[in-house]
Amino acid sequence: MSLLVLFAASFEQALAKTRRQSKSRPHSHLVKKHQATKEEELAAKEAAAREAAETQLIEGKNIILARAYKLYDSGTNESLHGNYKYSILQLKLADELLKEHGQTNSSLALVTLIALASSAQAGKDYSLARSTYDKLLSMRPQDTQILLALAKMEASQSNFNAAQNYVNRLLDLNPTNAEGRLLVDFIANKLKPVKR
């Protein structure tokens, strides 16, 4: 037998002996595991249940937001294709879903209402467009784009007094708004008495 084989065999025997001894000896260097009290176990169970409920609530909210976003996306696509009736239907459903689940002030709710007002106006449902723009104004009373859209819509319907009201509010907020300045001049010309 070679010296290397003898050395390997004696090394294996020594290693096996060390393993047997370490199994039979208590491990003084290990920290003793803490035994939880009944109160601690109950508190841990309550915390786990609370965490599971919060996770379920968040997942449910995410599912609702995903559904509302799909409706918004589909509604805006229908509007782009000129299918305003279907666009309005889907955007209304998205708005109702968001409202039902307390998401009325979310970004998605805002863009849904903007798209709904735009589709309603393009589809010549001026009553719905007006009420949707009014809802948007109640959410964002200083939004110059909403004021401008309302002023343009009212002017296109020959409701020049209403249009003037909206454009004046717009120009109070932003006196240098170019579209607002043009619109105010247009409205002023329309409101002038006709000379005979």
Image (cartoon, grey):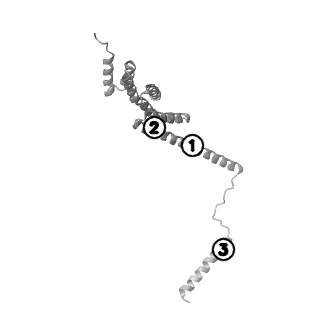
Q: How many marks?
A: 3
Give the x, y percent position of residue 152. 37, 25
Residue matched to label 1 = 60
Query: Callout 1, which amino acid?
Result: Gly
Residue type at mark 2 is: Gly
Residue 194 position, x and y percent, is 30, 12
Q: Is residue 77 left or right of residue 45?
A: left
Disc 3 is placed on an element classified as helix
Question: Gap in Å between the C-alphas at discs 2 and 1?
Answer: 23 Å
Q: Quadrant of residue 61?
A: top right
Whether residue 117 is visible, yes or no, is yes
Distance from the alpha carbon under mark 1 to that under mark 3: 56 Å
153 relative to 89, above or below: above
Do we see residue 177 in this rendering?
Answer: no
Residue at mark 3 to residue at mark 2: CA–CA distance:
75 Å
Q: Circle 2 is placed at which residue position?
A: 75
The dot on residue 21 is 3
Query: x, y (%) of residue 191?
Result: 33, 16
Q: Circles 1 and 3: CB distance less than 8 Å? A: no
2 left or right of 117 in image: right
10 Å crowding of disc 1: few (<14), some (14-19), many (20+): few
